[in-house]
Amino acid sequence: MYVAVKGGEAAIRNAHRLLDDRRRGDRSVPALTLDQIVAQLALAVDRVMAEGSLYDPELAALAVKQARGDMIEAIFLVRAYRTTLPRFGYTNPVDTAAMRIERRVSATYKDLPGGQLLGPTFDYTHRLLDPELAGDAEGRSPERREAPEEQMPRVSDILAAEGLIEEDGNLAEGRRTGDITREPLEFPLERDSRLQALARGDEGFLLALAYSTQRGYARSHPFVGEIRIGEVELELEVAELDFPVPLGRIRVTECQMVNQFKGSAKAPPQFTRGYGLVFGQSERKAMAMSLCDRALRAGELGEDLTAPAQDEEFVISHSDNVQATGFVEHLKLPHYVDFQAELDLVRRMRREAEKRPSDRPSREAAE
Amino acid sequence: MDPENTAVDVLERRKRMAVLAGAAGDELRRLWRGACVAVEAIPVRGPETGLATVRGRIGGGGSPFNVGEVTVTRATVRLPDGRIGHAYAIGRDHEKARISATIDALCHDPVWASRLEAAVVAPLAAAQQAADTRKREETAATKVDFFTMVRGED
């Protein structure tokens, strides 16, 4: 017999009303505007766009506000919104070599064309809390230095000249680019689908895995060949125009990780590479992504599979924080019937176990 | 494709569309109102918002892969004389798309093209260029100048 139980409608309604109130908080404090969130919590907005897999700063700011700063909830909101929109198509691949650079550093070459540009970085700060920011500080205005527009070749292109580094990843000719939002995940994945999953993967999860590779679980001897942050142009091929239509620019972070590689049966000793490309200013995420990308290429490069970060099915299946939170958090929803069934089962097992008391101690002793 | 569409026209049109797509909505509205264009553009499609999937390349220059989606708004309009204009831009600003599509339609006529270039497109392009220059110079001020420390006397 199955008995449906209804109830809680008034409680849910009032809970959501209470949520509205608590979200707003003290009414004598001005409400946050989306402009404020976009401008002053920019990196939170960027993370929501990256893992929400939707580039739209105002929507991401709204999600942050609605979620009371709960990032995964905000990412969930953005993902849900995404599904309500039609898809116009795929942009032409962005050209990161033509990026309008806002930050660019290399840990492998001191003097590279275009130089090392620190940009608005937390690096080299002392990580001391700044009491001035507790007030309504205006902020200092930046210095300027005259600079001609110049080419900033990717470091990978510089290294490639010597032939000691592998090329940019080229998949089989004629391959249709994988799209994990259209096709169910099927392992093993091609590198394109894997990178798509990593680009929207949880920063914390990928960071921990990347860290594990540095600590010796699939050691990959990495160097940051280059990190660059800045705006790239988007263009879309559309049926009504016979040229790619410009859409405007988005900000992205690119990381080229270079890894020493001693060679294997499949490949000679050389530098191999991991790649990261993430929406917004998301340097930690781009670095973690590139380390994970490299670790997941173990099979392709003929390395021994020994570590969690090399296990594609494990990494990719658990990298999506919306899926993860959905499954973990569903546990708090009513499971009254399931639990009753299990309770009955455990009671029965207990009764059966108690019927043969002589049996039990001897088995325990054996274990 | 219009038979009179030369490569130069396409280049001009593309450049204009890039400037309009990159413009801040409020700035475009202000200049458009200032241009006092009294023309009735009939909506053919949209304005409507959808998604474009952004692609990158493995390693920067290798095979393509999908990075994520971006909101895009598009519009197509027809002028009373039959000329068609299109607009696409990142974001969800419907009015911006409608105005941009109207400008695109009007600019099939060279007289309109030069008038709107002066009144709307050139000021937007100048503002974008100024913003780019400022940002480039602010970034340049954070460039590391390495120098070598010489130790001891020699």
Image (cartoon, helix red, strand yellow):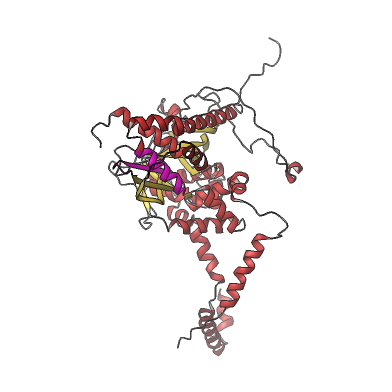
Left or right of A57, for residue B151: right
Q: Residue at x 44, y 51 (%)?
A: A197
Q: Residue at x 47, y 53 (%)?
A: A315
Image spot of residue B83 (x, y percent):
30, 41
Image spot of residue B131 (x, y percent):
54, 32
Against B37, residue A14 (above or below) is below
Q: Residue A164 versus residue B54: which sits nearer the camera?
A: B54
Residue A42 lies in quadrant: top right
Residue A259 visible somewhere in the drawing: no
Q: Residue A212 versus residue A278: which sits nearer the camera?
A: A278
Q: Residue at x 66, y 63 (%)?
A: A22
Instruction: Count every numbered label the image shows and give the total.
Output: 0
Residue A84 visible somewhere in the drawing: yes
Q: Residue B151 versus residue A330: which sits nearer the camera?
A: A330
Q: Quadrant of the C terminus of chain A?
A: bottom right
Q: Residue A102 versus residue A21: which sits nearer the camera?
A: A21
Q: Residue at x 48, y 84 (%)?
A: A4
Left or right of B79, for residue A76: right
- Hey, which residue is sitting farthest left in the picture? B3
Against A93, residue A332 (above or below) is below
Left or right of A61, for residue A297: left
- Hey, which residue is sitting farthest right in the picture? A131
**Residue extent of the magenta highlight:** B79-105
Image spot of residue A139 (x, y percent):
69, 37
Q: Quadrant of the N terminus of chain A?
A: bottom left
Residue A272 lies in quadrant: top left
Q: Is residue A19 found inside the magenta-colored segment of the image? A: no
Image spot of residue A200 (x, y percent):
48, 50
Q: Is residue B97 found inside the magenta-colored segment of the image? A: yes
